[in-house]
Amino acid sequence: MAYDAIILGAGAAGLFCAAQAGQRGKHVLVLERAPTPGKKILISGGGRCNFTNIGAGPANYLSANPHFAKSALSQYTARDFLDLIESYDIAWHEKTLGQLFCDQSARQIVAMLLEECDKAQEAGGSVEVLCDQDVTEVEHTDGCYLVTANGKLHGAHSLVIATGGPSIPKMGATGFAYDLARQFGLKIVEPRPALVPLTLGGEDVLFRDISGVSADVEAKSDKTTFREAALFTHRGLSGPSILQVSSYWRNGGTVAINFLPDHSDGWLLGAKRDHPRSSLKAILKEHLSDRLATILSEKLGVQTELGNAPDKALRAAEAKLARWDFTPNGSEGFAKAEVTAGGIDTSELSSKTMEAKNVPGLYVIGEAVDVTGWLGGYNFQWAWASAHAAARAL
């Protein structure tokens, strides 16, 4: 059978694109390398799938072209996906910062997407999902895409790349999308791990001694600041605020942490005036865990009672606590990265349809594109929105 479209990848973007196109009367084949569809959906959000963020907008995405995501995100919003969720009576709840999760299981999302694919028949279309497929060759000839998988040849007018990036290789993730893009002459923005823990060395290695300690901080990298928890690990830094800034951090750069973001200038001199017999460690313990307060006070070197400490030393300590620069020596790599930053260059694609400008019928959606969302449901929303844009154009 000749299909209208072949979609490579049965993840969030691939399945949603197939469902949307099928319900527009298209005949779609989805080829998935893994034994089952939606594997990354199932592990997301601790098994409850942080399926979107109610506040998702272009400002929440990182790309060489910060305007590229605007069109797709405006065509299909978080509210649109939430309407779909509610039409299936999937119970959900909102966590901090607009993050939406299933009350029960991420399996509900996968089941919903597959049922949406089945609905294609009502519109005269069809969606066929084949798993355990090893794609060995892709050709484009005479306006037709020919895909060889498990030794069988499939043909279609359009080809959609929805195989994601190389993050979480234990789930079967690879750089296959980039190999295909290069085959068709598309440029690549160098992929790198994003939403990933950072590792510490040198003088910062002392902070590994407080592995397991967390604090509500402001973390900053490359002029971008996030206010969430940071977690010290046996390898370095993690937690939501660190994962967020990791997408902006580059090798050799620093991550600045404000350990007391709610404190205004002069607070430590005020503590000296109000509690002259207290130590810096005692004051810090009022706001931070004992272990973190201890290591910070030791490194700041203010060992006397505050009343005996020079104002200059206290101002310096206050400034350091407001901007404590860490210089990570790396990250935990694609193995621990939630997503991939970089990818297929957006300059090669139409922002309205996700079609390659110079390769008719070739589309790229989801994580394979150089569009990376913040932590908290934004990357799923990009999957839905980019898939919707492509499906409307197929």
Image (tube, rainbow, N blue to C red):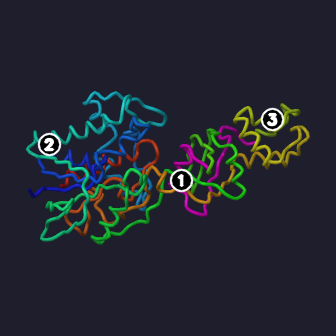
- List the residue tagged with mark 3: 271
Mark 2, secondary structure of its residue: helix
- Callout 2 environment at 10 Å: few (<14), some (14 to 19), or many (20+)? many
- Callout 3 environment at 10 Å: few (<14), some (14 to 19), or many (20+)? some
Which of the 4 image quadrants contains residue 327?
bottom right
Identify which amino acid the numbered label 2 is placed on: Ala
Identify which amino acid the numbered label 3 is placed on: Ala
Point out residue 187 in the picture as x, y percentages from the top left corner. Answer: 35, 69
Point out the tag, 1 or 3, that comes first from the N-terminus: 1
Identify which amino acid the numbered label 1 is placed on: Ser
Q: CA distance from mark 2 to mark 1?
A: 40 Å
Q: CA distance from mark 1 to mark 3?
A: 34 Å
- List the residue tagged with mark 1: 246
Point out the tag, 3 or 2, that comes first from the N-terminus: 2
Which of the 4 image quadrants contains residue 188?
bottom left
Query: Does the segment drawn in magenta span residue 251?
Result: yes
Query: Does the segment drawn in magenta span residue 42?
Result: no
Q: CA distance from mark 3 to mark 2?
A: 67 Å
Q: Residue at x 22, y 66 (%)?
A: 138
Q: Given this view, does label 1 or label 3 mark the residue nearer the observer?
A: 1
Point out residue 39 in the picture as x, y percentages from the top left corner. Answer: 34, 45
Point out residue 280 in the picture as x, y percentages from the top left corner. Answer: 81, 39
Q: Nearer the viewer, residue 113 or 39?
A: 39
Q: Which numbered tag is attached to residue 120?
A: 2
Is residue 331 visible to us here?
Answer: yes
Q: Which numbered tag is attached to residue 69?
A: none
Mark 1, secondary structure of its residue: helix
Relative to 90, residue 390 above or below: below
Q: Which residues are magenta?
A: 236-265
